[in-house]
Image (spheres, rainbow, N blue to C red):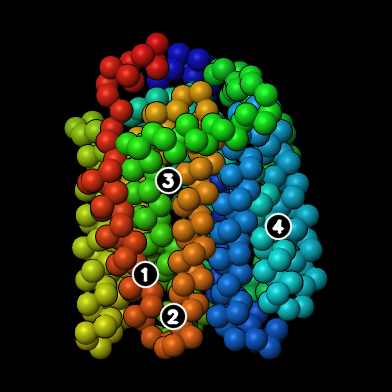
Amino acid sequence: MNSPAVSLNTKRLAILLAALTAIAPFAIDTYLPAIPAMAKDFGAPIHDVEVSISCFLIGFALGQLTGGPMSDRVGRRPVALTGLAIYVFASAIILTVQSPLALNIMRFVQAIGGGFALVIVGASVRDLFDGKEAARMFALIAVIMMIAPLVAPTVGAGLLAFSSWRSIFVLLVIYGSVMLVIIWMKLPETTKLRPRYAGPARRVWWTYLEVLRTRNAVGFMLAHTGASAVMFSFLTDSPFMYIDYFGVDAAHFPYLFGANVLTIVFCNRINNPLLKRMECHQILAIGVVVQLVAAASLFVACNFFTPSLYVVVPLVMVSVGAIGLTAPNATASFMQYFPHIGGTATALMGTMQFSCGALAGVFLGWLHSFEDGLWPVTTCMLGFGIFANLMTHLVAKPKQATENTAIAA
């Protein structure tokens, strides 16, 4: 761990950053149970409303792409506060929309603000920590953050039971407003502990080329992108899979969804003991293999046999839950290469992750135009699982220990 970080309260900082990161799962997961009701309210097919997930992911990616370099230049706090203000404003406007098109536009704007807020999380960790310490911090943040996707669908379903889907976005306005105040009062400016980018503003964007030219680091970024896309493929199609295809009641959807979160938490919790015996890239390699085996089994179970909820749910849990092993270790391995442009590196990684998730959603919608079975989502999950393994085993390469020492010094 870098010496400047010693004086900080690590757990309090993790809670603060996790609460900020929870902007994304709250914005997505709370309204998943309401998607069928929203489609009915708009008089549109369910897949037209599911597109709003892809719109959100695209906006989230663009928000990070813009906010990352800005945070390297002007600091983490100003970017986070600006993003939260946009997020709250767009969430309030969504309360008035009357069509899928208006919903998709405002979800895009809402997500840009969320991307501004999220991008400073990884950058702040990189400002303060290196190597395994960074991986432990990312894992701690992830465990705390998992409270959001665990409770979000339940909260959404509960609000839907007593009110309309619009009450869900009232909750998002409140959450965003509370985070705006907390970040204003409590978040330290971590760039003070690392050199800021001091060149001309127009040159900030060229730092993306520095990241993209680092082939070994890009391997970790793409591995994380592929593993995350497995999760996003399920996330996008989960209302159709469980509510429409298997006929699960919307009130029970949160329990099936929450099972995946519990698996992610479990994988996160075993990450720290594994880090005592293994390096980050070695744990990542295990995680992507576990994910691929589960995704391949899910593909076979759904397309060559009569799919059963009792088989599908456990296989989805492992496929999605493996992200608890892959995400912190891929992120830490990737960020190790970029100590002075953490915001830019985080932004590019987030952009790739959420853009790929958005493309998976668009591709799923296109496949569903041919058939409303489970083969579209299982095909996407398997394909992205294969991609993550190829990147991990053939492209990614960890930064040498001697280089790490030089950075820490």
The image shows residue 121, relative to residue 73, as above or below, that is below
Q: Nearer the viewer, residue 347 or 151?
A: 347
In primary-sequence order, the first of circles 2 and 1 is 2
- Rendered-image quadrant of the C terminus: top left
Mark 2 lies on residue: 367
Can you tell which mark lies on residue 109? 4
- Give residue 67's quadrant in the image: top right
Mark 1 lies on residue: 380
Residue drawn at 70 percent across, 84 percent down = 42
Q: Mark 3 to mark 1: distance in Å?
A: 26 Å
Counting from the top left corner in percent of width and height, residue 24 is at: 57, 54
In primary-sequence order, the first of circles 3 and 2 is 3
Label 1 SS? helix
Label 4 SS? helix
Is residue 206 among what the camera can see? yes
In primary-sequence order, the first of circles 1 and 4 is 4
